[in-house]
Amino acid sequence: MLNSLKTHWFFNTKNDLLAGLVVALALIPEAIAFSIIAGVDPKVGLYASFCIAVVIAFVGGRPGMISAATGAMALLMVTLVKTHGLEYLLAATLLTGVLQILAGYLKLGNLMRFVSRSVVTGFVNALAILIFMAQLPELTHVTWHVYAMTLAGLGIIYLFPLIPYIGKLLPSPLICIVSLTIFSILIGLDIRTVGHMGELPDTLPIFLWPDVPLNFTTLSIIFPYAAGLATVGLLESMMTATIVDDLTDTKSDKNRECKGQGIANIGSGLLGGMAGCAMIGQSIINVKSGGRGRLSTLAAGIFLLIMVLFLDNWIKQIPMAALVAVMIMVSIGTFSWDSVKNIKKHPISTNIVMLTTVAVVVTTHNLAIGVFVGVLLAALFFANKIGRFMVVKNDLEHADSKSRTYTVIGQVFFASADHFIDSFDFKEVISEVTIDLCQAHFWDITAVGALDKVVIKFRRDGVKVNIVGMNEASKTVVDKFGVYDKPEEVEKMMSGH
């Protein structure tokens, strides 16, 4: 028990607590902003961020990852809130959690292995661009003081770590926020602060069961939204977990994370919060600030609640310019600069997948659509590449022989089936054909259909066909779906029935 606590909770105590404090400060304006996007009271986003962060610290599968209310999820709630109100949003949040727990038990987290590195890179670059774009409203139609404060913040973030000893002792984003807040208060600068974002809650969250009818009509209203929220939430969480895995050189349990996200969303819904998921920006702030364990996520949630309830007068005075500087740092740190530097070295297909993923995510602001398009493109490129590796060699047994042997090498499936058929000469006058499949594998019904077509065409012209060397896996598929060795089926095909 003690060893487990030390391994997962208290191996990095100081850094985890400080990183959690930085994350909590950055969470406040974002949670308020996401609440405004969704069309609900800021309390809904703040309570959700507190609850999800605390719960996921205990039940999540990726230590050090931050989950809370997010913009991607908020965008999916807008119509539901406008049409049916907050109570239906809370019900949809509970159903979202149930669907995510179900996904965890179905081990859908394992599907992440089908997401290629180029899609992950595109996802990361798109998020970096979106994070930067989200800061632009705070940098437009403002006085020069805001630009000066933002530049000063970036200077502190990047230069403070260079100071001997103390630079490594405290996270620079925290120093940035504290120092700029003190400076702003002392000078009396008239710039936007956290207080301008909306009212902070002044009471603890309480248990709330959604006041909606428990019938099929309610289910038909909330299920489409819950399904969308569950999908986007899991997708963003799985992608963020993969990125944090890479940053920390550790592994995570994706299926446990699915269940954890579900439990956290149920908790959020019962405390009057909206659905949320992992946040790549906050997760990177946590990692860059030294956070590694579950304690950092728990600390972020607890510090968030303490600050909005008991330190609200101070929190309201934090200049938005300080938080913009932190988020710009996140954007710069998130973007994969190597993907741009190595664009000439990488295959064209890899670059197309990465750039398409970026373009779709940035254009639609929908992470799920962007990743889906990227995965689809990567699969098509992969199928095309593997299909081109299939070759069919042929040779006559003797110069004056009427027997020809075709040797098939490679993978025969839907992408290579046409090439397989075109490799045979059906016009040649021969009496016997041997098709050697020792170095081939048949994967699907399309491949089996191609083999049927070749054999039947030869036999229709009176050519004897011998098939040799088929492996057991291919034989199973061919025996089940093939018709060339079933006279009654061949007759039906020949007669057009």
Image (cartoon, grey):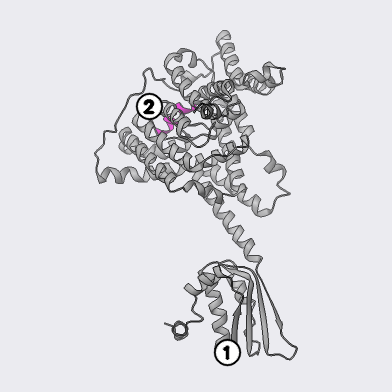
Task: Identify the residue shown where x is 41% and y is 38%.
Answer: 262
Name the spot of residue 467 as percent of width and height, x first.
59, 79
Task: Identify the residue shown where x is 57% and y is 56%.
Answer: 379
> Is residue 167 magenta-colored?
no
Q: Nearer the viewer, residue 358 or 454?
A: 454
Task: Identify the residue shown where x is 70% and y is 47%.
Answer: 343
Residue 124 sits in quarter = top right
* Residue 68 shows in this picture: no
Residue 159: give its label: none
Classify mark 2: residues with Cα within 10 Å, few (<14), some (14-19) or many (20+).
Answer: some
Image-based side of 275 in relation to 393, left or right: left
Name the spot of residue 448 as percent of width and height, x first.
53, 73
> Is residue 37 magenta-colored?
yes
Classify mark 1: residues with Cα within 10 Å, few (<14), some (14-19) or many (20+).
Answer: few
Q: Nearer the viewer, residue 252 or 422?
A: 252
Write down the residue under mark 1: 461
Residue type at the position of mark 1: Asp
The relative height of residue 428 versus residue 62 in the rendered view (above or below) is below
Write down the residue under mark 2: 41
Image: magenta residue range: 29-39
Asked if the residue at tag 2 contacts the one at tag 1, i.e. Cβ–Cβ closer than 8 Å, the answer is no
